[in-house]
Image (spheres, coloured by chain):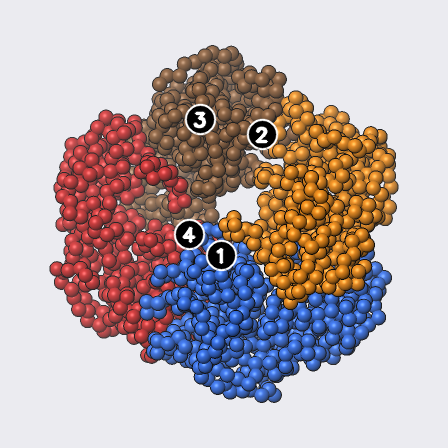
Chain colours: A brown, B red, C orange, D blue
Amino acid sequence: MCGIAGIVDSGGVSLPLYYALYALQHRGQESAGITTYHAGRLYKHKAQGLISEVFNREILEGLYGTAGIAHTRYPTTGENRPENTQPLNFTLKGHQFSIVHNGNLVNNDDLVSDYEEYGHIFATTTDSEVIAAIIARELTISGSMEDAVVLCMRMLRGSYSVIAMLDETIYAFRDPLGIKPLCIGKTENGYMVASESVAMDALGADCIRDVRPGELVRINGNGISCRQITRSDRSALCIFEYVYFARTDSVIDGVLVYDVRRRIGKMLHHEAPVDAEMISPVPDSGMSIAVGYSEASGIPFKEGLIKNRYIGRTFIMPTQTLRENAVRMKLNPIRGHIKNKSVVLVDDSIVRGTTSRLIIELMREFGARMVHFRVGSPPITNPCYLGVDFPTRKELIAHNRQPKDVQSCISADSLHHVSLEGLIHATGHSADDLCTGCLTGCYPVQIPNERSSCRHIDFIHGSYQTTLQF
Amino acid sequence: MCGIAGIVDSGGVSLPLYYALYALQHRGQESAGITTYHAGRLYKHKAQGLISEVFNREILEGLYGTAGIAHTRYPTTGENRPENTQPLNFTLKGHQFSIVHNGNLVNNDDLVSDYEEYGHIFATTTDSEVIAAIIARELTISGSMEDAVVLCMRMLRGSYSVIAMLDETIYAFRDPLGIKPLCIGKTENGYMVASESVAMDALGADCIRDVRPGELVRINGNGISCRQITRSDRSALCIFEYVYFARTDSVIDGVLVYDVRRRIGKMLHHEAPVDAEMISPVPDSGMSIAVGYSEASGIPFKEGLIKNRYIGRTFIMPTQTLRENAVRMKLNPIRGHIKNKSVVLVDDSIVRGTTSRLIIELMREFGARMVHFRVGSPPITNPCYLGVDFPTRKELIAHNRQPKDVQSCISADSLHHVSLEGLIHATGHSADDLCTGCLTGCYPVQIPNERSSCRHIDFIHGSYQTTLQF
Amino acid sequence: MCGIAGIVDSGGVSLPLYYALYALQHRGQESAGITTYHAGRLYKHKAQGLISEVFNREILEGLYGTAGIAHTRYPTTGENRPENTQPLNFTLKGHQFSIVHNGNLVNNDDLVSDYEEYGHIFATTTDSEVIAAIIARELTISGSMEDAVVLCMRMLRGSYSVIAMLDETIYAFRDPLGIKPLCIGKTENGYMVASESVAMDALGADCIRDVRPGELVRINGNGISCRQITRSDRSALCIFEYVYFARTDSVIDGVLVYDVRRRIGKMLHHEAPVDAEMISPVPDSGMSIAVGYSEASGIPFKEGLIKNRYIGRTFIMPTQTLRENAVRMKLNPIRGHIKNKSVVLVDDSIVRGTTSRLIIELMREFGARMVHFRVGSPPITNPCYLGVDFPTRKELIAHNRQPKDVQSCISADSLHHVSLEGLIHATGHSADDLCTGCLTGCYPVQIPNERSSCRHIDFIHGSYQTTLQF
Amino acid sequence: MCGIAGIVDSGGVSLPLYYALYALQHRGQESAGITTYHAGRLYKHKAQGLISEVFNREILEGLYGTAGIAHTRYPTTGENRPENTQPLNFTLKGHQFSIVHNGNLVNNDDLVSDYEEYGHIFATTTDSEVIAAIIARELTISGSMEDAVVLCMRMLRGSYSVIAMLDETIYAFRDPLGIKPLCIGKTENGYMVASESVAMDALGADCIRDVRPGELVRINGNGISCRQITRSDRSALCIFEYVYFARTDSVIDGVLVYDVRRRIGKMLHHEAPVDAEMISPVPDSGMSIAVGYSEASGIPFKEGLIKNRYIGRTFIMPTQTLRENAVRMKLNPIRGHIKNKSVVLVDDSIVRGTTSRLIIELMREFGARMVHFRVGSPPITNPCYLGVDFPTRKELIAHNRQPKDVQSCISADSLHHVSLEGLIHATGHSADDLCTGCLTGCYPVQIPNERSSCRHIDFIHGSYQTTLQF
């Protein structure tokens, strides 16, 4: 998961991109970068760290120009490589080229081999460099960015929301299934694209609409234009954008994330009511779900756990045996609320189960009489190959375990996951327009070594002018 | 406002003090420090920055010993002096002496003059160094720490919760009116004192009780003992600890802060009900008050503003004219919730009014039909001399302005502050046991150049052995 | 100018490369980097700054492996680009590839265009990436590193000493004219190559011999082997390596630099004797030349200027008008030595003349009666296109100016440059084996837009096994 | 050993103090600080590190005012305490007071006890805080700075060159024996004092004369005035200032350090001539001595060892066994010079002997046939109590060892130290005006637990107006 943004605005883009990154910081805390274009050259800065650590006023003032792109990166397991920070920047026959990417390619290795055959050498281990190589080669041959993107959509298999900058023009496109979000906004003196609508809110810009699956958007000083490169009769937005990843105040494909989560809470109550004295979220992610459960059930919403806002990446944990108590530093139970009470604890998901178990233990230590666990997503039983950093199958607590066994593992008095149908209904989308691979094992793109019962579709590639509506 | 902690534990104190500081980080983000004692010398580290920036594993591993004190500091207006970081450390006739302090002395200048007459020279501008000077001189003369604290209580006028370490013994005391909080806890192999009970929770320690106003607590390897140094027939806990400063999960003088705030919300509804479609807090401080208002009114609780958790001290704001829009980066309205809605917005207080006005404007920009503002404290009409960094009288929006005028300044459709009586009632304490100087102009200690209609009391100094109850 | 090194040693290479960089720090202070290879992956670290700033123990301990290469970079005018730090690292068909380069290509732009036609895109602006692209493409086609180097020697025009690492094997080669130095050493359990012999000295390794112009050296766990790829009847070592660049204790092509400089000093006395009371160097570069002049003339060697060893890159200079006085901070005249004395001041070269003028003014201010300037190189009248960062023709004080005019510009009482013949004689080499382009305008490789009266040679490419002699 | 400076100049003192510190950096590399006074408050910055690390443009621009003092500190064994950085800053009855100190008190503990009796508490472990306490107390009583300095001179036993700033006036004084250097200069629009004359040279200021032993200098906006506080019939300048500490271009008490060292070299030849082929210094400290030896003997001066200028505090050394080879990184023998040669190696002193032994081994490894060691100071047989960080007696190689044994320890072919008489003669001073405690065991002030055969003198305290001569 990453956050990306691109802006063309005659009033300058350095500060707006910085603000957009701040609004997207929840999508990645490992590294951040901005590249801008001015008068024939790129101005760039990227580094590991939070946005607040990577940029300062002096750096931002040195990022000249009226076009630019930005990126904030989520650390993938076991890889902490400085050279994987984005944007990636290149020169290309006298042109300046820069690219950012959110997503994951499942045929990356094959593409790398192919392009190495053409003589290309790769400096990083990122999918983004492969995408850059494809575009670069095609630009060299045909000179048309549109052709290059058509080629990408033919060759790339996986999820990819991409923003590329060729000199002062920004190109943005989303994979044919629209697995990762990307939306279009109108700034004061230009246009922008970004992973989520909150980036527009942060700038006082208007979010116009989402980039459509398989669509290419071009923004430069003359304005914005859109072309539909590929058509498909289904789409596959990652359902976890609604459950967990996106900010609660984002609107994705026309649906407010907060409302989806509140509806999940109501659905949970509908599917698994419980007689209890209070509803408490696991902060922050269970918050809106808990509000929905409380509304539907009439049981009072009351915070049973307070989150310490200051625990960050550099927090020092004690020796291994004490490490489990780190949860205690992050989440403090309110004894006065939970003592001798029967509590419904609401969280968005269970992955390995370790944290859930520690939280429930902590609730009991502070006096909770009963802890009923309600979860805003079905059991996660399969890995994700399309950009989410879930662990391997074996590490998933729900893999080869019945809910009853999971309940016992985490020592809850009762456990209920929302049903897949209930979750899909809460999103307001059709099951055909969502990726639910991690919940069903059925992925919308063919995954090497994964049997798949899914219907995979062929994309009709072409180019259709689409109209941007304000 | 600052956070302080002191621990004597045979298992080592470096990590526990670090965790305690994390739990108290909300009380001060400017600087942090820890001093420990081991085998005749002090080990110390302090610097400007957040706890996460000031300490790392290597530093903590170098802080040896089974006794130590810690401090995290809130920046006072216009003063950002590295030498004011605490603990302050001294040598004293072959003994090691270290001190931390939360509070503000109103007769600091007089005390400085007195002690300069005795030949003392001062390196810092903090009250803490004056307290250290008094203790040091008295220790030199009488050799008794208890006598030294008696002297402090006679000479110091203002608020002071102090933790001092003389070699391996920790002494903690609270001013005779108990203006600043301080509580006692039992750790696994020792005892501790800290500003708030959440510090105990973070360590898995038990909070035993608050240090009493005018009480002296001594902790060393042999255990803990307490003496009542001064008695008074009233106390004066800062009422804003309940309204805003303390963490919502802290228990102060036996009362859970969260519950006080929820009761304030109920009181607000009782005093100023309104016909509206949703109750929304200004996050984070209005949260529990809004929950209370929603419960009492039956109007749904729904977040209308989402806080960006990543905006910190180093956030770069644009030019002056745009600066007001910085609120937009920090608080994002949810259009889908507030559009065409009548909203009750709940906050803890109004100081200058600027932020309130900007938030209400933002709510309207995102479509709110009506914005009713409800405030969890009476109008702040007077400065604080006892440790809260309120601005001068002139800058307070409620100074010389009727609520009607303030409502117009912040452009709310209606505005109501909780009444002083309502607020006091919500705390569960008697008016005689709270400091309400900023709300009433009546301060519990005599302030130079402030007329005061308050009854000021004489303290009966003495020393009474008290029993610590578990 | 840069410093490069490569080591294969079964005892580990991280610390040895670090020491080698320290020994080569004089060749570049802008950035430094090390890449090592271990078990299928590269370990790497590079950053801007001095070696002491770029590396620490923890970083070095993370650079695993028994093969590695290193680089320290000199800043070229106006370019301070973080992405230009070396080594450059790539993946290549499952192999790991890393490269460092000292030199300058004069046909870089043409090569970039060619390779962009093949679909290659460039991330940096360095010659090194072009060399990497050529090698990568050829490796893809032929699979032979030797063929790839043959191709480089055919295509590259300019100066290049290169060390490349393909998995655990190191390849080093020097351009057919040997413009930049590179030598071979025997470490305790392996072999190494480095820009100068002092890198071997620092490790306690033995310097075996220089890499020959047009030669390819291969080092891996099995030992070392050498092949002569290209033959030419002349070579063209940069004469300024002897005059200024190399460390005085280095041996280049069999000749000790210190001795060359001392011979220059003797030659200077022979060509331009002067009746004076003392010989003083401009430290540090004029030192050995002054020793030679003193020996030949019998006039006492006496330091007239002391250099402040602590003035570094971050030294803060005052406003423009005072800036000239910065020389005063760096070089302090000894009044007691020069007052009323006639001094022979000896420096290695004059470029813009500004510093020389300021030094002579300073000498007079401190009382020198006469200042005779003696220079260890002929007037620099032409730019360098082969790796030395001399300014443009116009900025060179000797461009279109007679020595008499230069003497007047720098206000010396007399001025003499060593003659070209004298200088060449001092190196012990034939004029046919040195590059003297900046002194004569006659470059050993064809420079675009430079008329050249030089004989340019065709290289006979082939591959001849050569024997390494110990 | 430390470097100190103070300037009053109507053109501002921040940059001049910074330059003065750079000129004095050789006297201390552990920490640095500047305090300036402007309009009733102090502006200050100090930190651990080199001057280049401690200051930047922004910091210097924030140090307002036309009066200021500065300090650079040498690390004393085993003590690396951030709070010991200087200047020490205090407030004192509404006045601002700041102090820097070079030297060492032998009765520090007694003074600390005395002042603790008066109620003073100490924050640091430095002598400087004791001096500040004495001055502060006396200023409080008598209000006269002159009286305070008289008191200091009565009470302090040891070495002390002090610069104190009381608001906009600077006071400088030197102990009655003048053990540490301090001199007076005339800046463009004011006056200055500094440890060495090179600080004046760096600013383009004129060095007027040394502060006399027992003299007090006052500088403010009205100019400079001097008073002789104490008189004595002898003085005791540390002889090692001439041998090693001071910069070679400094003039101390009218004598150029370079010339002293050259005379030592001549004396060494006179006392211990040797038939050899070259004279080589151990750089940098043996340089001028070797020049003198070469001049006197007629044997050619030739550098046999080249120093790596980049090895600094952060240089990482390998494991213990290899550590000795670190000398190899710092000093590189020139094989071409020393192979099969008989070399006279000249150094300033031998302390532990370890480095000397390693250097001689290295010379032999690179082929030197014979290594004759000549040392510019007599054997160091006693510790220094007056500010030099020599090790304890036991660690001194010359303690209880005859020169013959030392020669064998360091494996030199011959070893000769200059005689005490020879050294004293080279300084141009009388034996009565030098401290030679470390060479003779006879200290000019009484040292606790040191038997002393020295004549100790009583100082005649008084106050005599002296005239400053330009």
Q: CA distance from mark 3 to mark 4?
A: 36 Å
| Residue drawn at point x = 43 percent, y = 77 percent | D149
Q: Is residue D328 visible?
A: no
Q: CA distance from mark 4 to mark 2?
A: 38 Å
- Which of the 4 quarters of the picture holds residue A123? top right
Q: Between residues D402 and C210, which one lies in front from this camera angle?
A: C210
Q: Secondary structure at mark 3?
A: strand
Q: CA distance from mark 2 to mark 3?
A: 19 Å
Disc 4 and disc 1 in contact, CB within 8 angstroms: no
> How many other residues sit within 10 Å of disc 4, few (<14), some (14-19) or many (≥20)?
some
Q: Which mark lies nearer to you, 1 or 2?
A: 1
Q: Tag 2: residue type? A: Phe
Q: Which residue is mark 3?
A: A8
Q: Chain of mark 4?
A: B
Q: Which residue is mark 4?
A: B49
Q: Is residue A165 visible?
A: yes
Tell me residue B261's x, y (percent): 23, 46
| Residue drawn at point x = 62 percent, y = 42 percent | C75
Q: Which residue is mark 2?
A: A90
